[in-house]
Amino acid sequence: MKESISFRLNGKPIHLDVDGDRTLLWVLRTDLGLTGTKFGCGESLCGACTVVVGKEAVRSCQVPVKAVRGKDVTTIEGLEQNGKLHPLQEAFADTGGLQCGFCTPGMIMNAFALLLKTPKPTRSQIRAGMEDNLCRCAAHHRIVQAIERVSTLARGVS
């Protein structure tokens, strides 16, 4: 049954008449055309569909869209501002933290949420925070380097 659902998406208000039980992933991809959020396993195990709700990384493949009513949702598309990539996006590219690119949006969104909560994480905090996002290309070491680079920038160290 359709219901009216409103939330903020990438800083802009969104109003939808949609089945509230549809997953956020499919609303983002098919209804709103934001295809940066990927479908991976569909079971909340791989992290390819990660978006940030409030300050929390969530697996959009398991979140009904009605659960984000009145909340702030950020997708990979929302990190770029005025044509400029977010420092995490730049760092992933610079360090080679992306290879095939499929897991990259989910990795970056998970890292974004990690840095929101812990702006200056240790390497072990980064590894623990990223543990549940899977990369089949084995770029994990470079992903950790990218997150460390951005956290160093947050510290004001060059």
Image: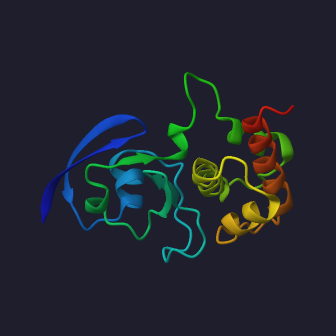
Q: On the rendered structure, is 76 left or right of 28?
A: right
- Please state the total of marks drawn on the protein image: 0
Q: Quadrant of residue 18?
A: bottom left
Q: Which quarter of the image is occupied by the C terminus? A: top right
**Is the image coloured rainbow, by chain, by secondary structure, or in one colour?**
rainbow
Q: Which quarter of the image is occupied by the N terminus? A: bottom left
Nearest the camera: 144 or 38? 144
Q: On the rendered structure, is 72 left or right of 95?
A: left
Nearest the camera: 133 or 1? 133
User: Residue 66: x percent and y percent?
Assistant: 25, 61
Q: Residue at x 51, y 74 (%)?
A: 44
Is any part of residue 139 visible from this angle?
A: no
Q: Residue at x 73, y 54 (%)?
A: 121
Say if 106 sits above or below 127 in the image: above
Farthest residue toward the top? 82
Nearest the camera: 138 or 66? 66
User: Residue 73: x percent and y percent?
Assistant: 41, 48
Q: Residue at x 79, y 51 (%)?
A: 97
Say if 71 sits above or below 83 in the image: below
User: Residue 105: x percent and y percent?
Assistant: 61, 52
User: Residue 119: x percent and y percent?
Assistant: 67, 47
Q: Residue at x 64, y 35 (%)?
A: 86
Is any part of residue 122 visible from this angle?
A: yes
Q: On the rendered structure, is 153 left or right of 82?
A: right
